[in-house]
Structure formats: structure tokens, C-alpha cells
Image: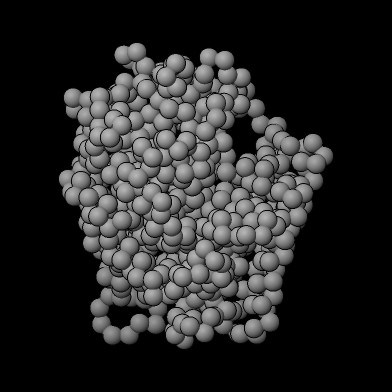
């Protein structure tokens, strides 16, 4: 049974990830502790009571396609109606269109709990929230007036249509086409695959955000435009009109997230689907990236949410399951496996990875909020660059950790973890997609190395590393023996990050791009591990607000992570600095012959 970790979430928001700094801004000055705690508590209640009980049912039942319509799992329509009534869909949206205008940090906290309840459920509203943000920033006033209020409320849902059979990560190969009409609309033709919530029975209308090319568009990604294509056309009075020329052709049978309909969509079988331009012609990718960046952090939070659920399930099982006699146990009978050192080791690994994912995702949300709230241009630029730096780390490391934690959860369950009835296997099956979609983690690593490290001539990442050193210095200066070797190991890891950062920046400036790309994935993990260790240490330094027992547990988790997991960075550094020659020399085509 899932229990929302509301106290841990609130502590991470307030004392690790800078929520207090956010409240110093005029935009969020009225967000008091009582309001924050109430929102987190109620979001956790909704996740535990309304969403979590449907997770296993949806995994077994999945979604069904019949007569051109997709139906969702039993109980989902009722849960989604409760979601709308709770106002959750508009948490961060503009109050002008019915939103609450709350910060991304609170959205991240709520999204974590909803994903712990059911990743397959939460991904649908997540895409709608992303569509809202893209429309707020890029759509015309007319489109906003017609669509935004119902998207913000959740009465209608949104989707993101990028992928085609020949165009996955490389959108240069995109073939969906758009034709202009004299009335200012467009006709859309083409096929899109892997479209999450492309069709369903939760709402009366679905608003598709579709990438397509105009006939005279320049080649490559410079020639992509973004179009709003509703499932049903909308009349001038806001009522639904005729069915648009868009249909669902199939629903994928997947490894996990069975409750989420993953659809193949066909546009333009009968003369063309009616669409409206969002933003400017041939500038669609910039508009879509507004939605994608939102989605990348949200996918990182998916990894976090599944990790928390898997961690709770594994701990409950380890406390209940009795096998053997643990070293030092007295009395009769077998010991709970939670007392055996190897199980303790795995449980610690699960808890520390989950805490790191939480702190990094919330820190990324904090940077986004600070960039929006800043009135000084220099401060806005700083926080925008920090959000850019943290987004690929939050997406990739948190989703990798989600898979690692779910796998450890199966191991702790033993043979029962391999049996579907415990639910441990579902967590791993669900989590496995997160490192793949919304830009694979390899692409996140490339983005970090090639686009984010060079921000401000490399000075932003150097300042970031200096901040991590300051935290390690505070740990060392605290002279608390319970930290063990945490400060020393953290400083060593940050040193590995600094050395590999210099290598990456030098490789790019000297034209050795292939060498940088060969080490991009291990580099992202070095950056994430060093950041994660620093954030755990910050929480363990204490705020004066937590009970002594809780502070002791935070210190133990920080020490364990720094003394064990951070040891990876030395090996990863060797991978980055030394393996490029062998990686680049490998000829996959020759190997296959």
C-alpha cells in the first residue's frame, strides 16, 4: 500500500531545494508554509486513495481499441473526474484561464506522488499540462480563447505528436505535411506513432499538438511547424462540432504502463485534418521544445515516483518476510530479512537513489521558477541557464535510478519479485520506458555536453561546481563524526566532475567532438552523482526544523551515498578520459558481418 511521503517532500522543498528563496520574490511571496503543506498533503491523499488502488488493475486490464475508439481501464474515468474536480490540472497554469499560478516546485511534488500512485495514469495529465504551457507561450489570442480554459481545467486533454515510423529521435526525417487554406487554417496529412493518450474515453475532446512541414518549408528541423489539431472541431460558442479527419489506427501492446494508451494516429484520410498554426511557420520546433522541456522534467519525476513506490513496497516486504537468523539476533525463530546486512545494503541503495532523484528534480523545478520570478535580467539569465543545465540531469539520472531502484526491489522480494502478484515486477516494467521516451538518456547526455556546458562560455557550469564544493566544505567544517568520510568522498567526486568538465569543454573548443560524444553518457552520471551527493549532504547538515532522529537518518543516508555510490565517479572519469579511442574504433557493421 502506497503512503505519500509528505513530510520528506515538504522538507526537501523547503530545506534542500530553495523554496524559501522562491518565496522572497513578489510572484510567490504569499505562499506560506500552511498553504504549501495543505497542497502537498491533499495531493498525497489523492494519489494514495484515488490513483494507487487502480495501478494493478490497469496493468492487468490495459486499454482496449474497438470500433475506432479507445477505452481505458475500469475506474479510470471516475478517477479522472475526481482529478478535474480537485483542480489539479491547472496547478501551475495562468489564472487568466482558470489556473492557480502556483510554482513548478509544487507541481513537481504533486506529480511525484501521482506517478507513485500510477505512472500510467499520471502521464496523461502531464502531457495536457505541457500543451497548456506551449499554448500560453506561443498560441494566438484566438486559439487561447477557444481552447485554453478547457485544457487548464482538464475538461479536454492534450497530446504531443512528434514521432513517425522513420523519424524518432531525428526529426529531420519528419514527413507529415501541412497545406495552407484561404481561411487561415491548414490541412494536416500523415502518420504519427507512439502517441501517448492519442485516443481515450476520459474527455469529450482531445487537442493534438502536431509537428508537420509546409510545402515550401526549408529542409531539416528549420522547416517544421506546429499545429493544433482537435479531435472534434469547436464551434464559435465553445460547443463541439464535427469530427475532425484524425483517427486512431492502433494501440501498442507494451512492456509496461499498460493503462496508458499508446496510439498510432492517422491524419488526413478524408481530405485533411483541420489544424491551426501555433507560433510561426517553420518555427514549430522551438514551440514544441517548450512542451518537451516541461515533459523531460516530468519524465524524470516519473522515475522518482516509481522509485518511491518500489522502495516502500520492498521495505514492507523485507520487514514482513522472515528467513534465516540475522547476525547478532537473539531469541527463537527466523529474522525479518530487513535485518540481514545484504538486504540493508540494498534498501539503503534504494532510499538514497530515491532521495537524490527527488532533490535533483525539485532543484530543477526551483530553477525554472526562479527564472520566471526574477525581475533582474542577470538573475533571470542565471536561473534560466541553471534550469537548462539541470533538465537533462534530472531526466536521465532520475529515470536511470528509477530502473535501478525497481530492479533492487525485485531482488529484495526474491522469487516473489519475479511473480506478478507482488507488484514488484510492474514497477520495473513501468519504469523501463522512462530512460527512452522524451529524448533517450543518451540524447540528454549529448544535450548536456554539447549545449549546456558551453552556456556563458562555460562559466555557468564552473560556478555550479563551485557551489557543490561549498557544500562539501560545510560538511567538512561541521566536524560531525557521524558523517564519516562523506566530505572527503564528496570532494573527490566533485574533483572528478571538474576534471571531466574541463575535458569536455576543451574537446569541443579543439574540434574533438567525437571524443566528447563518446564520453557524454558517463559524464552526465558523474555530474548527477556529484550533485546528488551534495544535495543529500545539504539536507543532512540540518535546518534546525527536524527531530534529532530524522536528522540522524538523513546523515546516515548522505554518508552511505557518499561513501559507496559516489565511488563510481572515479571509474566513470577513466571511461570519459580513456575510452574514446576504443569506442570510436569499434565498427558495428564489421562486427555484424
Q: What residue is rendered at 66% in x and 31% in y?
A: 586
The quarter holding residue 322 reads: bottom left
In the rendered image, the residue lying farthest to the right is 510
Pick the front one: 570 or 62? 62
- The answer to whether 339 appears left or right of 284 in the picture is left
- Seen in the picture, residue 226 relative to 364 is either above or below; the reply is above
Which residue is found at the position 74% from the left and 50% from the top? 456
| Quadrant the N terminus occupies | bottom left
Q: Quadrant of the C terminus?
A: top right
Q: Could you say which quadrant of the image residue 112 lies in?
A: bottom left
Which x, y percent locates residue 271? 34, 13
Q: Is residue 284 above or below residue 426?
A: above
Depth check, front residue: 350 or 179: 179
Q: Is residue 573 visible?
A: yes
**Residue 199, percent from left and from top:** 29, 33
Coordinates of residue 207 in the picture (x, y in percent): 35, 35
Image coordinates for residue 19, horizontal then vertical, percent:
52, 68
| Chosen colour scheme | one colour
Q: Could one spot residue 401 in this view of the protein?
A: no
Looking at this rendering, what residue extends furthest in the front direction?
237
Q: Nearer the viewer, residue 577 or 234?
A: 234
Residue 391 placement, left or right of 91: right
| Residue at 30%, 41% in the rendered image | 156
Question: Total label count?
Answer: 0
Nearer the observer, 514 or 455 = 455
Residue at point 28% right, 36% down? 238
Amino acid at each position: 500500500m502506497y503512503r505519500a511521503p509528505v513530510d520528506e517532500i515538504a522538507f526537501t522543498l523547503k530545506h534542500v531545494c530553495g523554496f524559501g528563496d522562491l518565496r522572497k520574490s513578489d510572484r510567490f511571496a504569499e505562499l506560506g508554509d500552511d498553504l504549501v503543506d495543505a497542497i502537498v498533503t491533499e495531493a498525497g491523499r489523492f494519489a494514495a486513495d484515488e490513483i494507487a488502488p487502480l495501478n494493478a488493475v490497469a496493468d492487468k486490464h490495459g486499454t482496449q481499441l474497438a470500433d475506432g475508439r479507445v477505452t481505458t481501464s475500469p475506474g479510470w474515468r471516475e478517477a479522472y473526474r475526481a482529478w478535474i474536480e480537485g483542480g489539479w490540472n491547472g496547478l501551475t497554469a495562468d489564472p487568466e484561464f482558470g489556473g492557480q499560478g502556483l510554482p513548478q516546485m509544487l507541481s513537481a511534488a504533486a506529480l511525484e506522488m501521482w506517478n507513485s500512485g500510477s505512472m500510467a495514469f499520471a502521464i496523461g495529465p502531464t502531457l495536457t499540462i505541457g500543451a497548456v504551457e506551449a499554448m500560453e507561450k506561443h498560441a494566438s489570442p484566438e486559439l487561447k480563447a477557444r481552447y485554453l480554459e478547457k485544457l487548464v481545467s482538464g475538461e479536454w486533454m492534450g497530446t504531443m505528436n512528434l514521432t513517425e515510423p522513420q523519424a524518432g529521435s531525428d526529426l529531420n526525417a519528419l514527413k507529415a505535411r501541412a497545406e495552407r487554406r484561404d481561411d487561415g487554417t491548414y490541412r494536416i496529412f500523415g502518420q504519427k506513432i507512439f502517441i501517448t493518450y492519442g485516443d481515450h474515453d476520459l474527455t469529450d475532446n482531445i487537442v493534438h499538438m502536431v509537428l508537420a512541414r509546409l510545402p515550401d518549408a526549408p529542409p531539416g528541423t528549420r522547416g517544421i511547424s506546429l499545429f493544433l489539431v482537435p479531435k472534434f472541431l469547436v464551434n464559435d460558442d465553445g460547443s463541439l462540432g464535427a469530427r475532425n479527419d484524425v483517427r486512431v489506427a492502433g494501440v501498442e501492446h507494451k512492456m509496461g504502463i499498460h493503462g496508458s494508451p499508446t496510439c498510432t494516429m492517422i491524419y488526413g484520410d478524408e481530405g485533411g485534418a483541420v489544424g491551426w498554426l501555433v507560433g510561426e511557420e517553420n518555427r514549430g520546433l522551438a514551440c514544441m521544445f517548450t512542451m518537451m522541456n516541461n515533459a523531460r522534467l516530468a519524465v524524470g519525476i516519473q522515475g522518482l515516483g516509481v522509485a518511491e513506490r518500489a522502495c516502500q513496497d520492498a521495505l514492507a516486504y523485507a520487514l514482513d518476510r522472515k528467513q534465516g537468523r540475522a547476525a547478532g539476533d537473539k531469541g527463537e525463530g527466523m529474522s525479518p530479512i530487513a535485518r540481514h546486512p545484504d538486504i540493508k545494503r540494498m534498501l539503503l541503495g534504494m532510499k538514497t537513489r530515491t532521495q537524490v532523484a527527488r532533490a535533483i528534480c525539485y532543484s530543477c523545478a526551483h530553477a525554472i521558477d526562479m527564472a520566471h520570478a526574477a525581475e533582474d535580467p542577470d538573475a533571470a539569465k542565471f536561473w534560466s541557464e541553471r534550469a537548462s543545465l539541470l533538465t537533462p540531469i534530472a531526466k536521465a539520472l532520475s529515470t536511470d535510478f528509477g530502473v535501478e531502484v525497481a530492479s533492487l526491489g525485485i531482488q529484495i522480494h526474491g522469487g516473489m519479485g519475479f511473480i506478478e502478484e507482488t507488484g514488484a515486477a510492474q514497477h520495473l516494467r513501468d519504469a523501463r520506458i522512462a530512460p527512452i521516451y522524451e529524448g533517450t538518456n543518451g540524447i540528454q547526455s549529448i544535450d548536456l555536453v554539447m549545449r549546456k556546458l558551453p552556456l556563458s562560455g562555460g562559466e555557468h557550469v564552473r560556478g555550479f561546481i563551485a557551489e557543490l564544493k561549498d557544500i562539501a566544505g560545510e560538511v567538512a567544517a561541521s566536524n560531525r563524526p557521524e558523517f564519516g568520510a562523506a566530505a572527503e568522498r564528496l570532494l573527490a567526486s566533485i574533483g572528478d566532475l571538474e576534471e571531466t568538465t574541463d575535458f569536455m569543454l576543451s574537446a569541443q573548443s579543439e574540434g574533438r567532438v567525437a571524443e566528447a560524444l563518446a564520453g557524454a553518457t558517463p559524464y552526465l552520471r558523474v555530474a548527477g552523482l556529484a550533485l546528488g551527493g551534495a544535495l543529500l549532504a545539504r539536507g543532512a547538515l540540518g535546518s534546525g526544523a527536524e527531530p534529532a532522529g530524522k536528522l540522524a537518518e538523513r546523515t546516515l543516508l548522505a554518508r552511505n551515498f557518499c561513501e559507496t555510490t559516489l565511488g563510481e565517479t572515479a571509474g566513470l572519469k577513466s571511461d570519459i578520459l580513456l575510452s574514446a579511442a576504443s569506442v570510436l574504433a569499434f565498427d558495428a557493421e564489421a562486427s555484424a558481418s
